[in-house]
Image (tube, rainbow, N blue to C red):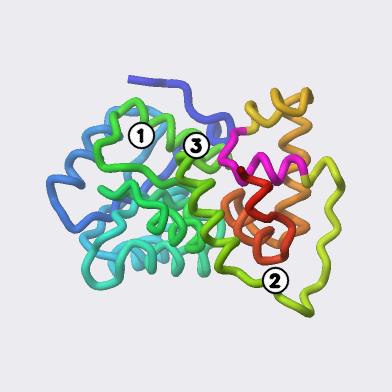
Amino acid sequence: MSNDAPALRKSRLARLVIADDHELARAGLRTMLIGETWVELVGEARNGREALSICRRLQPDLALVDVRMPDLDGLSTCRSIKQEFPLINVILITMHENPQYLLEALKSGASGYVLKDITQRELLATVRRVLRGEAVLNPEIVVRALNRLSNKTPLQPGLSPVLVSPRELEVLQLLAQGQTNREIARALIVSISTVKIHVEHILAKLGVCDRTQAAVRAIELGLLGPSSRD
């Protein structure tokens, strides 16, 4: 059992919701989370509409959502949650390590994308990182998915230019590769706190709430091309 709550959640428990149409899957996730002293499981849903209803009622910090569910799938559920409650983090859970699924997860606003065979340690680490504002995605699949998006997304004429500094563009390029703040700091030889400030500025300038959406938005604006992530 771990007592080290994420730094941003020390004042209270992190409130989580689980959404999966399989009872055994929900039970497995519940078992992984229930003994942690920094987590409070506040609701469970059997489909996407139930999950959205629970999020509207309870506004948790994070929702663990299965990609394939009846009556509103996980991607649609994620999109709806993020549209109504941008501050609710969503981690999508799937059996498929597929760039196309990840691409849709990125576009839907998910902060994490994990496989169903994830271990308890990996799940808890993922939850902690997402609650700290980091995206938790497989870097190799991220690169492939974002390259697909950039190849399919023509530059949009008439969009207002977004003025990012050269350093912010460097951070954005590394962020789009799925690198953590620590990894970006190491690559650019700066402190982690400096990276956090740059990320905050990037999110504000792009008008998005999280790192994955920043990468998607940057591609739509033509700030990142395939070569930026090769």
Q: Residue 27 versus residue 156: which sits nearer the camera?
A: 156
Q: In the image, what residue type sits under mark 1?
A: Leu
Disc number for residue 156:
none
**Kind of residue indicated by mark 3:** Arg
What residue do we see at 30% from left, 66% from top?
A: 73
Residue pointed to by mark 3 = 12
Residues rendered magenta in the picture: 170-180
Q: Quadrant of residue 168?
A: top right
Which of the two labelled residues, at mark 2 and mark 3, occupies the earlier sequence position?
3
- Secondary structure at badge 1 equals helix
Mark 2 → mark 1, Cα distance in angstroms: 37 Å
Q: How far is the residue under mark 2 from the one under mark 3? A: 44 Å
- Residue 155 marker: 2
Which percent across, then down, holds residue 50?
A: 28, 66
Tag 2 near tag 3, CB within 8 Å: no
Distance of mark 3 from mark 1, alpha carbons?
20 Å
Q: Residues within 10 Å of mark 3 (few under 14, many from 20)?
A: few
Residue at figure coordinates x 38%, y 21% from the top left: 2
Mark 3 or mark 1, earlier in chain: 3
Is-magenta flag for residue 156? Answer: no
In which quadrant will I find the C terminus? Answer: top right
